[in-house]
Image (tube, grey):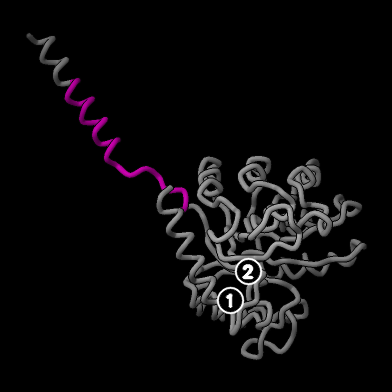
Amino acid sequence: MKKIKVSGVLAIVLCSSLFIAWTMPGPKAPANWKLGIALWTFHRFTVAESIRKSDSAGVHYIEGSTFQKVGDEIESTGMSQISDEGIVKLNKYLDDHHIQMKSIYVFGGKTLASWKPGFELAKRLKLEFVTAEPPRELWDGIDSLAGVYHVKVAIHNHWKGMSAYWHPDSVLAAIKGHPNFGACPDLGHWPKSGIDAVYGLKKLQGHILAIHLKDADQLNNPKANDVNLGKGVVDFKAAFAELKRQNYKGYIYIERDADYRPSNLPSVIEEIAYYNQITSKL
């Protein structure tokens, strides 16, 4: 009887444990994802105006760009010329709007010297990485710059014919042997080159620092239009499921190439709602 009683207790405990495990909600991958906005979305506006629009959209992360004007509220210069005083004011402006700038898109030329100012700016802003498309002949030098400035490089892709990084294999070739390189796949540019988002994400697993969240209305057409998320050819449900499988923990920046008037803000708010709808079902 004693043996039967113990077995019964064990059975009850086992059943209870299984019930608890079954009824408890599993970990939600989106909790590890940092949704933000790439400020190219508001490229007609200053950084200050873009920060206010990003705040209105309810996000807490942005990716800056070196070509925007900072804005008179902070400093009457371009981002690439911002002073140390301007950075102090910019950081306060970001704090006041509950937003963090974690990366910046930088442009460089054909010489290593032309890339150095972007890394200096990133370091002064205390950013985690720069998003860029470095020329192949400068891979070694730019990787070294990234190491010196303690700023990673997230390699971005445009489409075939415009970018050397249109295919994920090209990004992997750049990353190989360059410990400071990672990837920033643009999900809306891949379709223009016939690249499926899930295929690309699988290829770049373990290297993704950030994602540009975008959709396109056609496959295999470099002139495809940027459309609202879920209105084009990208299967975001499958793409997000793949990111969850990878246990992705990085940044996801909504980015618009479309130029709606008076601004892209209403479309961004719609896209955030779509993102929340899809990711809530993962």
> How would you classify the magenta stretch by its main secondary structure?
helix
Q: How many marks?
A: 2
Q: Which residues are magenta?
A: 10-31
The residue located at (50%, 80%) in the rendering is 96
* Percent coordinates x, y for residue 7 in the rendering: 16, 15
Cβ atoms under marks 2 and 1 closer than 8 Å:
yes
Q: Nearer the viewer, residue 274 or 23?
A: 274
Q: Amino acid at mark 1?
A: Asn
Give the secondary structure at mark 2: loop
Query: Does residue 11 belong to the magenta stretch?
Result: yes
Is 226 placed above or below 27 here? below
Q: Nearer the viewer, residue 252 or 164?
A: 164
Residue 219 at least partly seen:
yes
What is the number of the mark on residue 264? 1
Q: Earlier in the sequence, mark 2 or mark 1?
A: 2
The residue located at (54%, 72%) in the rendering is 267
What is the number of the mark on residue 256? 2
Is 156 placed above or below 196 here? below
Q: CA distance from mark 2 to mark 1?
A: 7 Å
Give the secondary structure at mark 1: loop
Q: Quadrant of residue 53?
A: bottom right
Query: Does residue 194 belong to the magenta stretch?
Result: no
* Percent coordinates x, y for residue 51 in the rendering: 57, 78
